[in-house]
Image (spheres, helix red, strand yellow):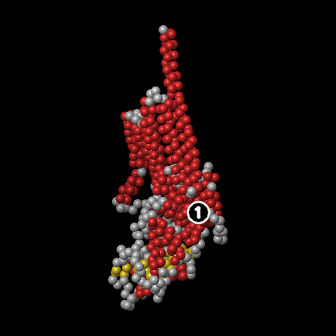
Amino acid sequence: MSPTSFQDAPLEAPATPAGVADILVCLPSLSSEALQVSLETIAATFPGEPILVASPNVLPTIDTDQPNPNNLSTLTLIAHPADNSSSPGWVLTASDYASAAALASSYNTPTLMLLGAQPTSPAFLRALADSSRSMIDLTVPRFNIGPSDSLVNSALLYPLTRALFGADIHFPLPIDAALSPRMAQRLASSAQRLIAINQGGSLLWPAAEASVAGLSIREIDAEGTLPPSPPQVDFNTLFGSVAGSLFTDIEARASFWQRARPLPVRPLSTPFAPSIEAEIVSPDILSIIENFHIAQANLQEIWSLVLPPQSRLAFKKLSQLPPSAFSMDPALWARTVYDFCLAFHLRTLNRNHLLGAMTPLYLAWVASHLRSVADDPTRAQQSIEQTAAAFESEKSYFVSRWRWPDRFNP
Amino acid sequence: MEQQIVSALRQSLHRIVLVLVSFLPGILAFLLALVVFVLIGWGLAALLRRVLTSLRFDERLIASDTHGTTNVLSDWSSSSSPTRLAARIAFWICVLLGIAVGIIAFDASYSADSQYSIFLLPYVAHITGAILILLVGSLLARFLSRSVLIGAVNSQLHYARFLSLGIKWLVLVLAAAMALDHLHIGGAIVELAFGILFGGIVLTLALAVGLGSRDLVTRSIEKTMEKPAVVPTELTPRDGADSRPKLRHF
């Protein structure tokens, strides 16, 4: 194999005839070794099936006449220009969706798969493709996370997506996804609006998009893999950008989620008490609780602009609890998130300040969650479900506040 | 002697009454012009708000905003939609017009000595400038103090409020000194007082930060020397057995 550089090649008319393959796999920028592993995994997953693989990397040329030990002869490699400058690289961004949709449209492939940089198993790839072939418009992975993994997701992204958009998708910000052509087109049109204002690196919320459009969504188990870690940037900045993006999306789709719709019936989870082990609070949790105490002492002026008196009173009581009894009611957390979302919409104060003032409250939820689950994955899952259920039951509060914000002002 | 004193007093009283009588129409004209323009401004603002709301001006502006200017504007204004901002601008333009018309009316009614109005008109401009300086200063003070407060709280600094107050008063004192200088009030005294106050606040903050955050500075130096520093929100295991962080927020 001799490498051929396609890195700076513009997106041209396809040299490969349209319709030659029914799956297009878009890869991110990878090292040559990782690219080779990915190609072999794809070839092994779909033996004998013609697959289009698009990558912004230096692509190896595959000689189809020679016997190939890795069976890569079924793959057709194409280049696609990726906007790496703005991409966070740990989740799919607007430019990722736009370029992938453009390619899928050019090559007329009915199934589009976007994969992240982390290695994926053939079983997962097969499940992703099968789901898309069975007319599911959006398929995303569900990771098996530990009690202290993906906490922003468990506290904020999953409960809000489930409560407001009725999409029971545990990871609404995917790094891997399979899209139908109509889903790809919808995402591409949303992405183009962002790219037009030079915000190609912005996050998109495909689960919300699919839900609003009435398209089908499915999540499949990505066994053994964890969601990819974001780049080493300041947590506060990252939290602000993700939460801000989600709040902006909720604001833009207000007419959808305000409409009453029946929520799917779920089995009631039994409330659980902290175990004996949970009474011994780890130093990490103590540090987070200390952060909350500092915020409670200093941020009252800002919180009073956002939170109603009963929520502030509840936080005051929470701050007076000893660390061994530190426990935030899921309903309080749900109402708090909704209050901040409303303040974001009303621009009660500068949005960066608002999200910065929300960070200590999120950390308080983290402390409460970690203390109550005590490193038990089953209890962690129960806690996440309870949080999501609280967001669903408090949705009416959010809708009321959204429609009549002045009624709740002290 | 007594009659001369009484006569002098009567004459001075008479003169004061005359001056007042000659001023009164001018003052009344000024007040009337101001009240009328305030009412016009109020009505215009209400009309503008109603029309823009019915036209969904805010939504259209946000939808057509390709450069993010709406966000910038609303980030700096206290509460705000573009409609409300436009209504407020219309109201205050009317108020300023009323003041200008009032002064001209004052000048016309008190023609005996036009030096007063010649003196007053530029001074009103100076007052307006000073008010603008104070307004911008107070907005900037609030923005910066909140930024510092939230940043300090998220960095787990116990004296976050103190830092924030220091920044707030620093900017307010600067704005007040600039406003007084703009009005030509105080002269060197203001400059001296400002220098002392500003220097005092900076020294206090420097001492507070220097004495209170030695650990933070040490950590910062360690970080620059490429030693691993503990990030409070991404907690890593201490035993080093597992390379994965204990807490993963994302």
Q: Is residue A311 above or below residue A75?
A: above
| Residue reaching furthest to the left | A2
Name which residue lies at 47% across and 70% down: A92
The N terminus of chain A: image quadrant: bottom left
Apparent side of residue A32 relative to residue A406 in the rendered image (left or right): left
Location of residue B52 in the rendering, given as x and y in whole percent from the top left corner? 56, 54
For the point 39% across and 53% down, which residue is it? B217
- Where's residue B48, x and y in %? 56, 50
Amino acid type, mark 1 = Ala
Q: Residue furthest top?
A: B1
Disc 1: host chain: A
Q: Closer to the camera, A322 or A34?
A: A34
Image: A85 above or below A45: above
Question: Label 1 crowding class (10 Å Cα cut-off): few <14, some 14-19, many 20+?
Answer: some
Return the x and y of residue A301 as percentages of the image width and height: 54, 49
| Residue A361 appears anywhere in the view | no
Q: Position of residue A334 (x, y in %)?
A: 59, 61
Task: Identify the residue position indicated by label 1 in the image.
Answer: A254
| Residue at horizontal 58 percent and vertical 62 percent from the top | A254
Q: Is residue A209 above or below residue B71?
A: below
| A372 in relation to B14, above or below | below
Q: Nearer the viewer, residue B97 or A382?
A: B97
Q: Nearer the viewer, residue A93 or A270?
A: A93
Q: Is residue A107 something that shows in the picture? A: yes
